[in-house]
Image (tube, rainbow, N blue to C red):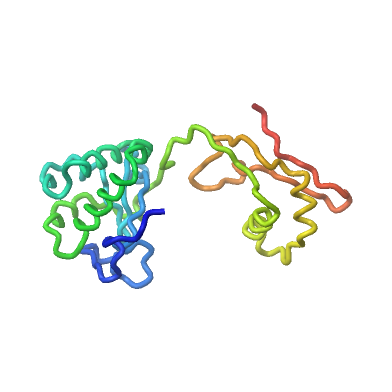
Amino acid sequence: MAARDATHDPALRSWVASANEAGTDFPIQNLPFAVFRRRGSAEAFRGGVAIGDQILDLAAAAHNKSLGGAFDGVVQQALQAASNDSLNALMALGQPVWSALRLALSRALREGSPAQAVLQTCLVPQAEAEYGLPARIGDYTDFYTSVHHATNIGKQFRPAVQPLRHRDVQDTLARAEILEQGIAGRVVIVLKPDAARPGERQPGHQHQPRNQNRYPE
C-alpha cells in the first residue's frame, strides 16, 4: 500500500464542484482509475479517473497538446498507457510512475489550476458512462487460508444467517478445495447469477454438503 502524501491533504479542494460536496465518494483525495466509454456508444474503452460525479477521460487528456506543461515526461507516458482498453500497461510501469501521475492529476484538478479550462472538455458524467473490465486477467489462484478466512467469507456472502457456527465452517472447510486454479473468464464487472460458482449446497435431508464447484474445461 502506498504511503499517504500531499495528494491526501484533507484541505484540498477541486474545481469540479461535485468533488467538494459532503458525502461524495470521489473527492480530490480519492482518484480511482477505471476503464469506461459513453454508454451506448461505439467508442473505444479507455482509462479514466473518477472525480466527483465526473470521469476525467485520460485518453482525451493524453492527446490534448495544450496540457504539455501539466503532463509531461513520465506522466505523459503514464497517460498514454492509461489510454488503452485495459490498465495493464499502466500497472506495468510501477509505483513511482503511478505516484507521479496521481500527483499531476491532483494538481491539475485542484482549485486554481491553470489546466481547468482544458480539462473541463475532458470530463464525462459518470451517469452517462459504462464500464469495462479494468485489467486483462491472464490467470489467478483462489484459496482459503484458514477457518477464520472461511468464516469471514461466509459472513459477507450470507449476512442474514447468524451466527455462523465455528463447527459448521470447520466441517465445510474440511471438504472444500483449499487451493484451486481460477477461471479468468469468470471475473466480470458485475456479478451475474450465471457467473458465480455454485459452491456447496446441503439439502435438509442430507448429512454431508454436496460440492457443485465443477465446470467443464
**83 vs 165, nearest the viewer:** 165
The answer to whether residue 18 is seen in the rendering is yes
Q: Residue furthest top?
A: 217
**56 vs 146, nearest the viewer:** 146
Residue shown at 68% from the left, 51% from the top: 146
Q: Is residue 23 left or right of residue 171?
A: left
The answer to whether residue 85 is seen in the rendering is no
* Count of number-bearing discs: 0
- Residue 190 location in percent, x, y? 51, 47
Q: Is residue 138 left or right of residue 55?
A: right
**Is residue 121 shown above or below 5?**
above
Tell me the quadrant of the picture where the C terminus can be found.
Answer: top right
- Residue 75 location in percent, x, y? 22, 44
- Residue 173 location in percent, x, y? 74, 49
Q: Quadrant of residue 159?
A: bottom right
- Residue 14 location in percent, x, y? 23, 64
Residue shown at 18% from the left, 52% from the top: 119
